[in-house]
Image (cartoon, rainbow, N blue to C red):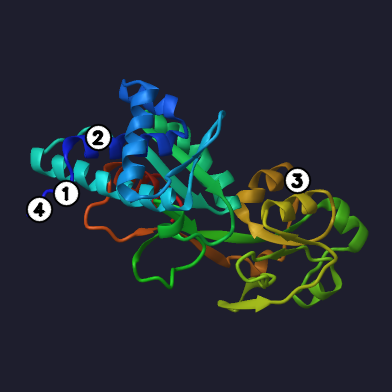
């Protein structure tokens, strides 16, 4: 087999990836115990070899070009596979390390994932976790994510899907709203109430509210004078301040219900839920940090909340 890379070339790729991960030649140099000039020379060698600029440099910062981003994602995967190959051959079970990027919806991020991260990093301090809290769908390949949590099974067969939980939904309103507008006692009576809406960023549609009727799940279209987009937690904030009735995840409002700041409505039709699913690309050898994080989430979320 033809040899395409020498030791200097491979070293340059490692330094380039470090600079891309840390966003700084100086930080990369400190991490690799070399000088910033050595990192700069390595990146320049790669740019000359590829005939493309990898970074846009200013006096204050560096950022990847589009070509640099694409090259970084491929190089990072290749280096991960090399490390995994060494681990398999040597039987080494070294500690996971390096960057890990995960995309998670707003409610699941704030109420499930973020509270766990200090515990994870106490166990694995060399893993740097980058969390993107957003309700939009992401592209694993183009955006360089390792994992995502979403509310439905993917249409993409290249992704592994593992259920974390079925999150129970609950209908609530503040006492101040109920004093003003009255308490609904049937699903039909919801039509006369201000029902706070959430708009899905992926489709622009407002989410219908699911309820259980005689053991069957039914979806009810509701109307109201308030609608939140992007930040799902806004609907609960509106409800807390007496804006109207809202259906949200029980874990978002559990403490409010316990304090009496919100009141559960129509419990006879409760019990509906929505799934939260952990997604990651199929790979013959996942990096150690990704496998470790997946196992951690399944242990602390997948088992606990089923």
Name the residue located 86 percent from the left edge and 58 percent from the top edge: 178
**Label 3 crowd bin: few (<14), some (14–19), many (20+), radius 10 Å:** few
| Structural distance between the alpha carbons of marks 4 and 1 | 6 Å
Residue 220, image x, y percentages: 69, 76
| Structural distance between the alpha carbons of marks 3 and 1 | 68 Å
Which image quadrant: the N terminus? bottom left
Residue at mark 3? 260
> From the viewer's perspective, is 40 left or right of 238?
left
Residue at mark 4? 2
- Of pointers 4 and 2, the one earlier in the residue sequence: 4
Residue at mark 2? 11
> From the viewer's perspective, is 30 left or right of 79?
right
> From the viewer's perspective, is 225 left or right of 110?
right
Numbered disc 3: secondary structure: loop
| Closer-to-camera residue (210/11) | 11
| Structural distance between the alpha carbons of marks 3 and 2 | 60 Å
Seen in the picture, residue 73 relative to 270 is either above or below; the reply is above
Q: Do tag 4 and tag 1 residues touch (Cβ < 8 Å)?
A: yes
Question: Furthest-right residue in view?
Answer: 180
Numbered disc 2: secondary structure: helix
In the figure, residue 227 lies in which quadrant? bottom right
Q: Do tag 3 and tag 1 residues touch (Cβ < 8 Å)?
A: no
Name the residue located 72 percent from the left edge and 76 percent from the top edge: 221
Q: Which mark, by number, is residue 4?
A: 1
């Amino acid at each position: 087999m033809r040899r395409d890379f020498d030791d200097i070339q491979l070293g340059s790729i490692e330094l380039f990836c470090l600079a891309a991960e840390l966003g700084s030649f100086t930080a990369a140099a400190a991490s690799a115990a070399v000088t910033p000039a050595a990192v700069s020379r390595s990146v320049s060698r790669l740019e000359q070899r590829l005939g493309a600029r990898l970074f846009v440099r200013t006096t204050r910062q560096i950022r990847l070009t589009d070509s640099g981003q694409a090259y970084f994602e491929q190089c990072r995967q290749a280096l991960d596979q090399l490390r995994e190959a060494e681990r398999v051959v040597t039987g080494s079970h070294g500690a996971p390390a390096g960057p890990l990027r995960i995309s998670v919806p707003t409610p699941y991020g704030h109420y499930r994932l973020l509270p766990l991260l200090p515990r994870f990093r106490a166990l694995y301090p060399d893993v740097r976790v980058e969390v993107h809290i957003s309700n939009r769908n992401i592209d694993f390949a183009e955006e360089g994510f390792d994992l995502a949590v979403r509310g439905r099974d993917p249409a993409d067969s290249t992704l592994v899907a593992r259920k974390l939980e079925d999150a129970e939904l609950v209908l609530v309103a503040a006492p101040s709203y109920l004093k003003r507008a009255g308490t609904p006692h049937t699903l039909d009576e919801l039509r006369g109430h201000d029902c706070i809406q959430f708009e899905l960023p992926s489709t622009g549609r407002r989410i219908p509210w699911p309820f259980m009727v005689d053991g069957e799940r039914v979806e009810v279209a509701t109307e109201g004078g308030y609608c939140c987009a992007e930040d799902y937690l806004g609907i609960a904030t509106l409800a807390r301040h007496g804006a109207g009735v809202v259906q949200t995840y029980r874990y978002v409002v559990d403490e409010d219900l316990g304090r009496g700041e919100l009141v559960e409505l129509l419990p006879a039709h409760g019990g509906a839920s929505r799934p939260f699913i952990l997604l990651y690309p199929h790979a013959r050898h996942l990096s150690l940090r990704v496998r470790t994080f997946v196992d951690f989430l399944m242990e602390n979320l997948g088992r606990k909340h089923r």
